[in-house]
Image: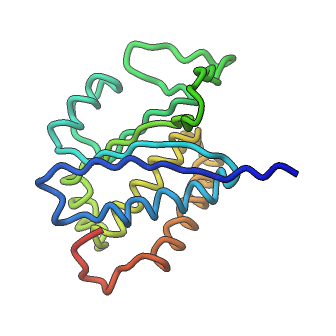
Amino acid sequence: MIVTQLKRNIEIYIPRIYRSQVSTRNIEQAALLVLDIVIPDISCQLSISLCSSGAIRKVNLEYRGEDKATDVLSFSSEFPGEWQGMELQKENTKIEQFLLPPNQLPTIGEILICFPEAKRGAKKSGSTILKEIALLVIHGILHVLGYDHGNTSDKAHMWKIQKRALSEFMEISDNPGPNHPTI
């Protein structure tokens, strides 16, 4: 019997300005948790970057044609999205894998999270920044893995997984209380 060890690499970039308010450990926990739920037997790597409103606004304009900041953007290596100026070919929804060097994990995608938008979202929903960032990590990864909320049944399925992952994250997070300022 051949036993393959599951490997996951989550690259996290947090600009200096947000580092005192965000824990890479909790971002990684949220990411690993949702990956374990959705693709439990697949080794992969993923990058998650926090950014400013201005940075995400530029990316949102370039790829989605929307000249505004948003809370999270996901870029999948596996599933094509609908981008500004591009027609989605419905019959070919899988992207071919690149040949990888030995021992390199396949990259499933990249996620950008706007920290100021996350803070606004937490305040608006009466939540904590811990929970809001975890929600955006989970939501972004689900999009990277091909989940969408464009119609009622897809939305219900995605929200069910998202709710489960967030609930499990909150149980294991090192959040000492409702006013904990960090993730």
> Looking at the picture, does residue 80 appear above or below residue 161?
above
Q: Residue furthest right?
A: 1
Residue 29: x percent and y percent? 45, 64
Residue in view at x 62 percent, y 46 percent: 43
Residue at the extreme left: 17
Instruction: Locate residue 41, reporting x and y percent.
Output: 70, 51
* Quarter of the view holding residue 182: bottom left
The extreme bottom residue here reads 177
93 in relation to 137, above or below: above
- Image position of 9 with respect to 169: above or below: above
Q: Position of residue 105 (x, y in %)?
A: 56, 38
Q: Nearer the viewer, residue 99 or 28?
A: 99
On screen, residue 139 versus residue 113, left or right, reads right
Residue shown at 58%/38% (left/top)? Answer: 146
- The residue depicted at 33 percent of the width and 42 percent of the height is 112
Q: Is residue 56 left or right of residue 2?
A: left
Q: Is 89 placed left or right of 174 in the picture?
A: right
- Looking at the image, what colour scheme do you see? rainbow
Along the viewing direction, whichever of 95 and 120 lies nearer the viewer: 95
The answer to which of 59 and 65 lies nearer the viewer is 59
Query: In the figure, residue 37 lies in which quadrant?
Result: bottom right
Picture coordinates of residue 172 (x, y %)? 48, 77
Q: How many marks?
A: 0
The residue lying at 38 percent from left, 47 percent from top is 11
Quarter of the image with the C terminus in it: bottom left
- The quarter holding residue 180 reads bottom left
